[in-house]
Amino acid sequence: MRVKKITEVLGKKVYTDSGDFFGEIEEANLYENKIDGWRIKVGAHLASLLGGARGVVIPHQFVKAVSDVFIINKAALPSQEMDMDESAELM
């Protein structure tokens, strides 16, 4: 297993575990010398769903994989967005 430096993952693309593009890693939040969460700059298509927010903070426990891209658990997404996705699937 190769350990990555935080500076190596800044700017990486973030996808949900269902394959949807979510955004890019902007910053790591540290607490007691450990990664607590990730600030993610969301894509333009999600900003409107998030009430105009330019980013979100995802707790590190929802990160499934870090490599060339980040894979996050879809359960980490705000519930408003999940409601929108579910209604779009019904159409």
Image (cartoon, rainbow, N blue to C red):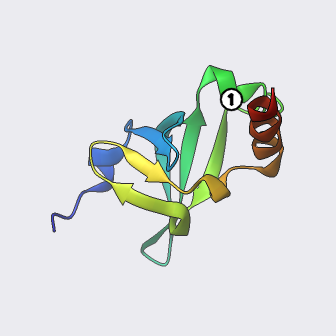
Quick one: label 1, few (<14), some, or many (20+) residues within 10 Å?
Answer: some
54 shown above or below 1? above
Q: Which quadrant, please, contains the C terminus?
A: top right
Residue drawn 34% across the image and 54% down it: 66
Residue drawn 68% across the image and 50% down it: 77
39 shown above or below 23? below
Depth check, front residue: 69 or 52: 69
44 shown above or below 5? above
x and y percentages locating residue 8 in the rendered image: 26, 46
Depth check, front residue: 6 or 88: 88
Residue lying at the far top of the rendered structure: 44
Q: Which quadrant, please, contains the N terminus?
A: bottom left
Secondary element at tag 1: helix
Residue lying at the far left of the rendered structure: 2
Residue drawn 20% across the image and 64% down it: 3
Relative placement, left or right, of 86 versus 44 is right
Relative placement, left or right, of 38 versus 79 is left
| Residue 13 in which image quadrant | top left
x and y percentages locating residue 50 in the rendered image: 78, 35
Residue at the disc numbered 1 = 46
| Residue 12 in which image quadrant | top left
Relative placement, left or right, of 11 versus 36 is left
Mark 1 belongs to which amino acid? Leu
Residue lying at the far bottom of the rendered structure: 32
| Residue 6 in which image quadrant | bottom left
x and y percentages locating residue 44 in the rendered image: 64, 21
Relative placement, left or right, of 83 versus 44 is right
